Amino acid sequence: MRLAIAVAVLLLAAGIAALGWRLVGEDTRGADVETVEIDSRHVPGMDPLPVTLVEPAGIEEGERRPLLVFLHGRGEDGHESNLGEALYAALEELGDDAPVVAFPSGGVSSYWHDRDGGDWERYVVGEVIPLAARRMPVDLDRVAIGGISMGGFGALHIARRHPGRFCAVGAHSPALWRSGAETAPGAFDDAEDFARHDVVGAARSDPEAFTSQPLWIDVGRSDPFVPGVRAFAEGLGIEPRVSDGGHDADYWRAHLRAYLRFYAESCSGDER
C-alpha cells in the first residue's frame, strides 16, 4: 500500500503539470481572470500567497453569485493548475448559474489543514473567502468548497470543521488514508497530526459533520486512493461515484463539467 501511495504522489505531480493550462492569450469564454496575493497572517512563512479568481461572463450590476473555493492537489503553482479550456467551457455552459471560483495556493504539500508549517484551514476560511468577497460579486451565504486529491482531502477536512457553513462540498479523487501508516511523506507532521485530521475516522464517528450539506465524492476505478475513498464513504453510509480512470488530469478534465454543475445546482439558492 505504501508503494501504491508513493506512486500516487508521483502521478499527482505529473497531473499538476498537465493541468497547468493557463496560457497567455487563451480564450476564457468571457470570464475575467485575475491573480492577487495575500500576505497571510495564518501562513506567514509562505508570504505572499497567490489566489486566482475567476468571474464568469454575464454577471449583471448588483448581482451576487455563489462562490466556489476550489483547492488544488499536491504540486507547485497549484492556484493555476485547474485553469484552462475545460473550466472556461464549463462556466460558459452554466450561463447565469455559473459561480465565481477562487483558486487559492496551498503550497506544494500543505494538505490544507492547520499544522506546524501554517494554519492552512484558517487561511482558507479567514482570508481567502473574505478576499474573494471584497473583489468579486459573491453571495457569502452561498459558498461551496471542493478540491482535487490533496484538495479533496482539504475540502472534506474544512467542511468537517465548519458543518453547515458550505452550500456544497466536493471531493474529487481525494487523498484519503485509512491509517497513518498509509500516508504519503509530508502529508502530516506526525502520528498525532494525522489523528487530529483523520477524516476517514471522523466519517465513522461523526458522519453528520459531512452530510449536513450536499456532498459529492468521486474517484477513478484505477486510482490508488480507492480504498481510502471507499472507507470514508462506508463510514457515511453512502456509495462514492466510481468510474473509469486514474489519478490524473485526463480523469479530472473529463468530469469537470459535472463537478461545476453539482456546485451550481446545490448553491442555486433554491431550497436544499
Image (spheres, rainbow, N blue to C red):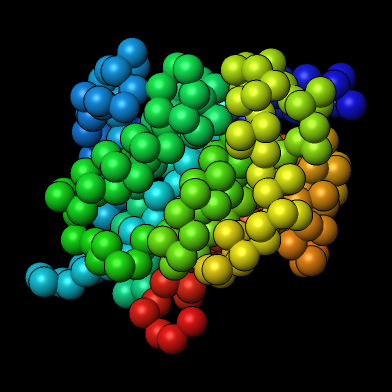
Residue shown at 56% from the left, 45% from the top? 157
**Residue most extreme to the right:** 1
Residue shown at 19% from the left, 61% from the top? 137
Q: Nearer the viewer, residue 171 or 248?
A: 171
Rendered view: 51 above or below 252: above
In this image, 45 relative to 266: left or right?
A: left
Question: Residue 123: x and y, percent?
Answer: 34, 35
Residue shown at 16% from the left, 49% from the top? 135
Residue 208 location, quadrant: bottom right
In this image, 100 relative to 209: left or right?
A: left
Q: Nearer the viewer, residue 59 or 45?
A: 45
Q: Nearer the viewer, residue 179 or 6?
A: 179
Residue 253 appearing in the image: no
In this image, 196 relative to 53: left or right?
A: right
Residue 17 location, quadrant: top right
Rendered view: 257 above or below 73: below
Residue shown at 37% from the left, 73% from the top? 97
Residue 68 appearing in the image: yes
Rendered view: 207 above or below 53: below
Question: Residue 224: x and y, percent?
Answer: 82, 35
